[in-house]
Image: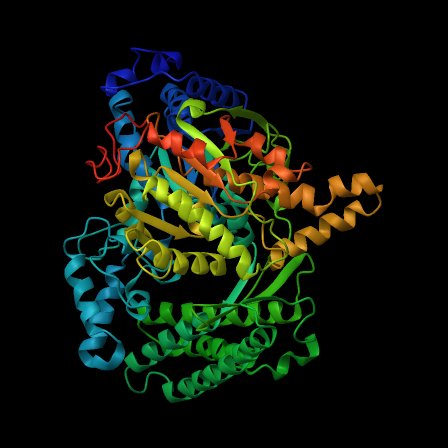
Amino acid sequence: MRDIKEFFAPGGLLASQFSKYEARPQQLKMAEGVAYAADNNRCALIEAGTGVGKSLGYLIPFLTRIEEDRNVHIEVEDPETGDVKVEDRPRRLIISTGTINLQQQLMDKELPMLRKLFPWLTYAMAIGTENYLCGCRLDRALADVANNPMLFSSVDDLKMIEAWSRKTKTGMRMDLPKTVDHSVWSAVNRQADLCKCKEFTEENRCFYRKARAEINQAHVLVVNHWLLMLGLTVENVKILPGFDYLVIDEVHQLEAIAAQVFGIEVSNFKVKHLVDDSRRFFRSMESGMVKASEAQEILDMIEGGSETLFDTMRTRLRAEDKEVLRLRQPMLAMDQLQNVELITQMDRIAQWLADATPHIGDDQRLMEVRSLSKRAAKIAGETRRWLTQAEPDHVYQVASESKGKRIVAKSCPVDVSSYLRTCLWGLGVPVIGTSATIATGRSMDFMKRKLGAEAAEEMVLDSPFEYDKNSLIYVASDMPEVKGAKQDAGYYQKITGRVVDLLSITRGRALILCTSNYAMKTMGASLKVMLPDLKIMVQGEDLERHSMVDELKRNPGAVICATESFWHGVDIPGAALVLVIIIKIPFSNPADPLFEAKSEKIDRAAQALGKRQQFMAGSFMSLSVPEATIKLKQGFGRLIRTSTDFGVIAILDPRIVTKKSYGQRMLQSLPRTYVVADLEAVRKFFAERLPPPGSEPMPGVETGEIEEAPF
């Protein structure tokens, strides 16, 4: 087996791949920790600060072990037939990520580079089956629309897909030249219970089978957290191929995804999609095959029942003046379910479709009828469980999305740790969870409890970047303290004034992170008036997310004012971003149903303790503070992306220094650098690094890119 030190040493194998390579002790230490876990069949959580190069830190030790014995011979049970057979497959590492950006980085950069060092290496990316085009269903849809042009809302979309299908190599929806209507894609995409293909041919164009063939031969398979959780929990369906090692990158995002997978979600849109797909199917049926008119009547009643049920939910939301509402009591008792038209008619259409199957001779039609029947039965079952709150350990809520157009009834477990302890950390293979934000202080106890990973090894690796030379934390200790959920006009006036002071120093190049839409919109509107020479972009109002990032990279006078999704996953290296302003400590919204339920569970457990112990074991110190600390670290991570970056983190919430019980802990969790409370220190910091007003932009400002090895 090749020694991993040969890869990471100065002048080593990695250095041969880059014109500029800097050996990082933290990266080697991570690789050694992963190697230990692989050799001893252990699980581990590893926090790798920005710049460590965690992707290579876990890839190289696993690849050196796969290289020793590239194939696996093992007896496996077929989930569909129950037959036991000997499987001969590549020894495999699965990497699960939380973002598309990281998936693309692995597929486009790290893995192609590593193939030069491991010429035998094969790799692939897996996505959900419904994201692939099904050539057989496309041909059927084209034939149906030739007979009835009114089947689809956009025939042009269908024709575009047909032309694209002759050229595409992947058949993946993300590679379409433009977005298509849902009703069109759902008629031509690959669905597991509608596909009979065993392999890809030019005739059937089953791109899922083409991708599956590549997946089955891959030594490294890249997936997202959602697909991973489905693959680990869905019974009798082989979503993922066999594997020997597992890495969960961006592991801090796994809990939220797991909660969704283990929960229920029914929406008016979900019902509408089923009704639309069913109507299209019946309109496409030849006359006399089934009594389609009877089915259409049932679908009419389903639409009416859906409108009644979801309008009731919408009314409750409006009465409470909320976009998300927790339901502490069931909406209906079990004996009242027969009065719910949506459930009654969903059950009815499911049975009607099942009864119709003997009268359908066409195999493709038969599969579509069975699929529609299963979907209807599933929606009826999920609606029934949600209305009666069948799972006592779940939190139930109704939410309004897309400006009130989409109403969602959903539930999820309050605590997913027991699920993950069994289905993930108990797999019996080495599992590595990694991220730049796992620990609070130097402890991983909080994340371990959340993820059910109490038995995992742990390692905290600091960033190799010189934060004390290239960054500064400015705390506006003279700003008003936050009181309650909503702040008055005076608060925003003072905070906005300080933001203007800071932006006047950098003249743009800034990201403002808010904790609520109201704060973001209030701040953005004021800044547009007060700083007309800068391009102030407000998330959700001005440009799409990716366009806002591109504009910040291109325009030195640009500023992004944003909320939740910009706290993580935004990578803007170079002088395009030199100032990150954090308006408030990012505590979770106490009214959020899931957070509220978690808090109640923790506080109930702490009631038996003494007063001091109750405070430390209560939900504020054991849930709110560590969650906010991790999110604060994520916000800080937006600033310094490479070794030559510089900038200031401005925290406009004085509680981080005035609240001794938690403020100091939060500051100590951030990268070590100087903390100042004087704007003059900020001016001096930038005076030494930014060009004077009116001079040429710094190199890299136009694109936000710099020439540097990514590892």
For the residue pair 287 and 443, the one nearer the viewer reads as 443
Residue found 19% across the figure and 36% down from its top? 696
Tell me how many marks there are.
0
For the residue pair 624 and 80, the one nearer the viewer reads as 624
Colouring scheme, one of rainbow, by chain, secondary structure, one colour: rainbow
Residue found 56% across the figure and 52% down from its top? 259
Tell me where residue 28 sits by quadrant.
top left
Residue found 50% across the figure and 79% down from its top? 306
Q: Relative to residue 346, is residue 112 drawn left or right?
A: left
Report the quarter where the C terminus lies: top left
Q: Is residue 501 visible?
A: yes
In the displayed structure, would residue 78 be above or below residue 205? above
For the residue pair 38 and 574, the one nearer the viewer reads as 574
Q: Relative to residue 665, is residue 19 drawn left or right?
A: left
For the residue pair 306 and 616, the one nearer the viewer reads as 616
Residue found 63% across the figure and 46% down from its top? 624
Q: Position of residue 127 (x, y in %)?
A: 36, 49
Q: Position of residue 529 (x, y in %)?
A: 35, 59
In the displayed structure, would residue 71 be above or below residue 571? above
Q: Position of residue 262 (x, y in %)?
A: 56, 54
Q: Is residue 244 visible?
A: no
Report the quarter where the N terminus lies: top left
